[in-house]
Image (cartoon, grey):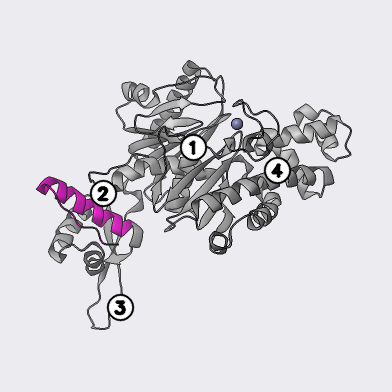
């Protein structure tokens, strides 16, 4: 797609530079001639800007390709290690942090179980995570350009505010402002399902996919929706709350106050609860031995192990959850007409047991036209999708072409 720069000379210069950087990111290795064709910029402008990007160390020449005329064009590509970024995933039960380069190669990683969920406790633990990122980076002689943070719950990504993290039980924490008072490094804050979607769109299965939905299933269930290449935020940044769409009309009470929400029947706690209830009712299952007779000790790891061993009760519980997820996915497909629906989150390791039913139910409940060209798959970035997505929050700033319609994460 050609994009043309207009406006003040400074804006044009900045736009052209980002346009070229983006073209190299998306098409590299790519020749100067092809960059000019792709961007519509004059070849001399391309040459001048590429020279400056090479001087900054962000772009390099590499290899020499073949050309039928005889002169071999030089190809340009990003220097992946030219810049490093921090990515933090603040989930309902834990915090993950990664240091990654321009290509989202993870250089360092850490995980902490959440200790306390009050606002003060969360802020303290975010300080610890950011301190870790900065210390680790320094020890390896890399400087972090910026840090992206993907948080549980509804988040105002324009202002960096955690609006409503249901697992923490409070509202409105201006996390970006709080971190800005302590650190000089730029910070972006956004929702974790949005991060998962962006991570996959930039570096996973969603590359070059303009219409996609990525569903994150863990303690809660959320999704990121991208239509025509644009992420949907909605009026209050709550778009994508698929976990609170009704899939069981007279189903169980959800923590949101409604009945039969997807989250109340298919989140990880809902699946564990279903298995526990059956164990307590005396259903025969190998799970009972795994937890030494204590159903309250049940974890998702036990569920995966039992499902793999062919435990009928476990398979039944997963089957029921998969049907509900399939219904929700079908609703997404009918409503949004995506070409890709991705599933990820804590549930990732369980997906082999869920996906066949999810696909069958979705196929049986969708219109023929949107069904024909949609693929339902697991995320490619596995358990790193959210942390890498947090990195994409800040990568967007590096590659965003300045314009009147700059949209935040
Ligand atoms: Zn609900």
Q: Which residue is mark 1?
A: 192
Magenta stretch mostly in which secondary structure?
helix
C-alpha distance separating marks 3 and 4: 54 Å
Pointer 3 with pointer 4, Cβ within 8 A = no
Task: Identify the residue at horizontal 61%, vertical 25% (top origin).
Answer: 257
Q: Give the quarter of the figure containing the C terminus.
A: top left
C-alpha distance separating marks 4 and 1: 22 Å
Task: Identify the residue at horizontal 83%, vertical 46% (top origin).
Answer: 312
Q: Which mark is residue 401?
A: 2
Secondary structure under tag 3 reads loop
Residue 269 occupies quadrant: top right
Say how many tags the image has: 4
Residue 335: x and y in percent read 52, 50
Secondary structure under tag 1 reads helix
Q: Is residue 303 left or right of residue 119?
A: right
Q: Residues within 10 Å of mark 1 (few under 14, many from 20)?
A: many
Residue 104: x and y in percent read 42, 48
Pointer 1 with pointer 2, Cβ within 8 A = no
Q: Which mark is residue 66?
A: 3
Q: Which residue is mark 4?
A: 321
Q: Residues within 10 Å of mark 4 (few under 14, many from 20)?
A: many
C-alpha distance separating marks 4 and 2: 42 Å
Task: Identify the residue at horizontal 26%, vertical 65% (top origin).
Answer: 38
C-alpha distance separating marks 1 and 2: 24 Å
Q: Is residue 265 above or below residue 30?
A: above
Residue 51 or residue 385, whichever sits in front: 385
Residue 58: x and y in percent read 27, 51
Inspect this view and state whether residue 379 appears. no
Q: Earlier in the sequence, mark 4 or mark 1?
A: 1
Q: Which residues are magenta?
A: 1-25
């Amino acid at each position: 797609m050609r994009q043309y720069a207009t406006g003040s000379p400074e804006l044009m210069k900045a736009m052209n530079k980002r346009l070229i950087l983006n073209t190299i990111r998306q098409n590299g290795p790519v020749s100067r001639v092809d960059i000019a064709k792709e961007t519509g910029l004059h070849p001399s402008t391309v040459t001048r800007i590429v020279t400056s990007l090479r001087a900054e160390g962000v772009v390099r020449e590499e290899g020499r390709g073949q050309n039928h005329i005889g002169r071999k064009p030089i190809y340009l590509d990003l220097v992946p290690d030219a810049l490093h970024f921090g990515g933090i995933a603040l989930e309902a039960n834990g915090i993950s942090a990664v240091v990654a380069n321009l290509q989202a190669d993870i250089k360092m990683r850490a995980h902490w179980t959440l200790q306390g969920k009050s606002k003060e406790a969360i802020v303290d633990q975010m300080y610890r995570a950011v301190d870790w990122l900065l210390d680790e980076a320094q020890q390896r002689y890399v400087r972090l350009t910026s840090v992206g943070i993907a948080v549980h719950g509804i988040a105002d990504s324009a202002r960096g505010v955690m609006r409503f993290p249901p697992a923490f039980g409070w509202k409105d924490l201006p996390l970006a402002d709080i971190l800005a008072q302590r650190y000089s490094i730029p910070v972006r804050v956004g929702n974790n399902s949005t991060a998962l979607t962006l991570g996959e769109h930039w570096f996973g299965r969603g590359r070059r996919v303009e219409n996609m939905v990525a569903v994150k299933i863990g303690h809660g269930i959320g999704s990121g929706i991208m239509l025509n290449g644009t992420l949907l935020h909605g009026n209050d940044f709550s778009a994508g709350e698929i976990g609170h769409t009704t899939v069981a009309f007279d189903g169980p009470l959800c923590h949101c106050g409604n009945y039969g929400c997807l989250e109340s029947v298919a989140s990880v706690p809902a699946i564990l609860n279903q298995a526990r209830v059956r164990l307590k009712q005396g259903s025969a299952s190998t799970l009972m031995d795994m937890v030494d007779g204590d159903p309250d000790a049940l974890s998702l790891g036990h569920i995966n192990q039992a499902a793999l061993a062919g435990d009928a009760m476990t398979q039944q519980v997963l089957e029921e959850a998969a049907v509900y997820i399939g219904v929700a996915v079908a609703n997404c497909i009918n409503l949004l007409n995506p070409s890709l629906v991705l599933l990820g989150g804590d549930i990732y390791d369980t997906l082999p047991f869920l996906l066949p039913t999810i696909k069958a139910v979705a196929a049986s409940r969708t219109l023929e036209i949107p069904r024909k060209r949609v693929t339902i798959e697991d995320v490619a970035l596995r358990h790193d999708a959210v942390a890498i997505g947090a990195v994409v929050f800040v990568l967007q700033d590096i590659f965003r072409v300045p314009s009147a319609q700059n949209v935040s994460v």
